[in-house]
Amino acid sequence: MSAPAGVVGRETPRDAESPQQAAQRLAEKAGALRDGFRLECLFTYRDADGSTFFWRIRAKHPDGRKWIRPMRRTAGGGFEIGEPTFPAGGKPLFNLPGIVAAPPDAPVFVVEGELCVVELVRLKIAATTSGGANSAAGADWAPLRGRHVVIWPDADEPGAKYAQDVARVLQGLGCSIEIVDVEALGLPKGGDCVDWLTAHPSATAADVMTLPRNTISANCANSAEESSAQEWPELVPLDAPTLPRIVPEMLPGWAGDFARALAEHTETPLELSAAMVLAACSVAAARRLRVLVRPDYFEPCNLWWLVALPSGSRKSAVQKCATGPLLTWESEQAAALAPEIKRITSARKTMEEQIKVFRRMAAAPRKKGPNPANPEECARRAAEMEAELPEIPIPPRLWTSDATPEKLGVLLAEHHECMGWLSSEGGVFDLLAGRYSNGVPNLDLVLKAHAGDAERVDRGSRPPVFVQCPRLTVGLSPQPDVLRGLTAKPGFRGRGLLARFLYLLPPSNLGFRTLRGAAIPEGVRSAYAAGLGAMLNWKPAADDNGRERTHLLRLSAGALQVWEEFSRAVEVRMRPGGDFAHCMDWAGKAPGAAARLAAVLHGIEHAHGQPWDTEITPETMGAALDILAVVSRHTLVALELMGADETVAAARTIWGWIQGGRLERFTEREAFNALRGSFPRMSALREALGVLVERGYITVQEPPRDSRGRPPSPVVVVRPELVGG
């Protein structure tokens, strides 16, 4: 069974069951292999950012029959037959990343079946499909909006119907449409583009582009069904799409094992434990490592994570377990330093008392006698001893959970310019917004501590603080409501604070827990503590003058190529109309975040050795990009959430009720009675319904009124294609 890498993407081998292995197992379990079918391909459906959404298994019988099944992830990270829950817009198109990256003026071929897409992409033709002949209505065709589309149907009645269905949808998206004249190609009944290309093995992209085609006029679709659909406005999705998930094999070695066990133990989403474990590892990596991406372009290894989950989700328990080895290391270092601290403290006190004696003698009037004190000599001795006062060692600190920006600067200066800010709450945003500075934001230090830029703080009431290369790691897990309105806080968006975070918005497990989470195996816990401890005990590098500095990590040629391809894809997505066009502040930092994340993963892989002696591999960079692909989808939603008002959230509540009941129509009064716990007043319900009307989900019809009796309640009609979705 093959997986054409140019279209379906890379499936990096992991210790756990791979998608290909899962497809083999599920086909065997279903009896398809016993019936003589042979697995041909596993097609990966991806989101625009490249993150895996689901798979389609394709098997074929010698007699020509096909066995095609969707495959999805289970909540536990395994695989099962079935489609995932699709966003409101519908199922993503196949080869979506390739369509997004294609030049805007390039024609996009729509075919029936993934294998046809693979063959066209092999010729460097932009191509996509929604799947089988009956799949057009359930797909999200919005990425083709305004494009020039060429539909190449199969040479049979289902193919012709598929072409008509697709054309009908694309006309509503303003596409210019042509349909390949399959009759002129002389294909057998049911023949498709694969059959034509097989019969013309030397065909090129230019040959395909010159195939006979018929133009579809703007008024060719005249069915009553389409006329009805045209009455509805363009559908604007709500801000709660189904987001991709972090899956177990994305995390390497001992860190991944612990994150998975911690998620199972606390019955929390894997995203929470993964982010907190990576934050802890980032604290360790940032102390000793930085990565050289290209000549004169370096990135530190500190990452900023934010995972939003509601109160009661055991966020504190996850943070406590993830940061446990950091506290243990601090305690061990403090215990080792304790005798030295006592010795130096005692010696310093003795010298301070001697200094006091010399200072008093220097200040006293000169006396006559056999051994008169010389004030000038006493002053000199006092000054010399003050200069020789030994510094009392400070036990090392790795992280804090509550500090003002001013105190954070002191902590950075005292502890090798590295610090973690780890908290299960969102109070950090109140501190940065100026809780203790009369509402004046204080962002300079934290912004520079993300990039590693020098900062000097001179305040009249405090000693000056100077840090040359501060590196601040952040790991937060606030409630989702904390995010709302953050973009309105002065400087948070405009100065790039919010653009520095890697966001995850996993679904809450509350209400679905067994409350009998499995204990973390002792071997897994010990391996995590040992691995993180080894990272913390890496010896620093030294410059020519003996001063400590960070070790330099380098990318292999393959890793650099993977990183550059990712960077170019991000650049394209920032163009007008791209999904990153409205968050260029975050997207512009995404390539740097990818390099940092790859460096941390590399450090985890080589925790018990010297990671600076080994180049970062393409596989490690690929693993970082897999994680970042998930993060990017979550980040788009998080940034919208931070600027959204509460009415949109209320509209999502109503839409969830509509979907749950698969309602085609209902009255406002029925909705109010069903959702009284969320809407204490009818006016609040109507305001939220207004959002659904504006976004094209529903329409509200006023029934005819009778002069007698109570006016009837308005009727809400749900958009037909969304009923039951």
Image (cartoon, rainbow, N blue to C red):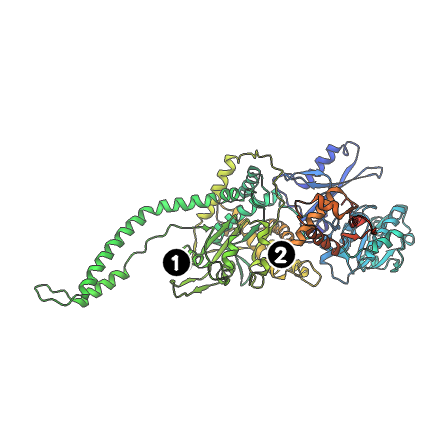
| Label 2 residue SS | helix
Between 57 and 83, which is closer to the camera in this rendering? 83
Task: For label 1, count other residues whose C-alpha is less than 10 Å away and answer few (under 14), some (14-19) or many (20+).
Answer: few
Going by the numbered disc 2, the residue's amino acid type is Leu
Q: Say the numbered circle drawn on residue 546.
A: 1
Residue 472, x across and y down, in percent: 49, 55
Q: Which residue is mark 2?
A: 639
- Left or right of 118? Residue 348 is left
C-beta proximity under 8 Å, tags 1 and 2: no
- Left or right of 659? Residue 516 is left
| Label 1 residue SS | loop
Mark nearest the camera among 1 and 2 is 2
- Res 124 visible: no
- Left or right of 246? Residue 415 is left
Relative to 34, is 19 above or below?
A: below
The C terminus sits in image quarter = top right
For the residues marked 1 and 2, what is the alpha-carbon distance in whole angstroms?
45 Å
Residue 66, x across and y down, in percent: 81, 39
The N terminus sits in image quarter = top right
- Res 606 visible: yes
Between 551 and 721, which is closer to the camera in this rendering? 721
Going by the numbered disc 1, the residue's amino acid type is Gly
Location of residue 690 by image quarter: bottom right
Q: Sequence order check: which comes first, mark 1 or mark 2?
A: 1
Residue 39, x across and y down, in percent: 75, 39
Residue 480, x across and y down, in percent: 59, 50
Residue situated furthest left in the rendering: 370
Between 60 and 242, which is closer to the camera in this rendering? 242
Task: For label 2, count other residues whose C-alpha is less than 10 Å away and answer few (under 14), some (14-19) or many (20+).
Answer: many
Number of numbered discs: 2
Q: Say the numbered circle drawn on residue 48.
A: none
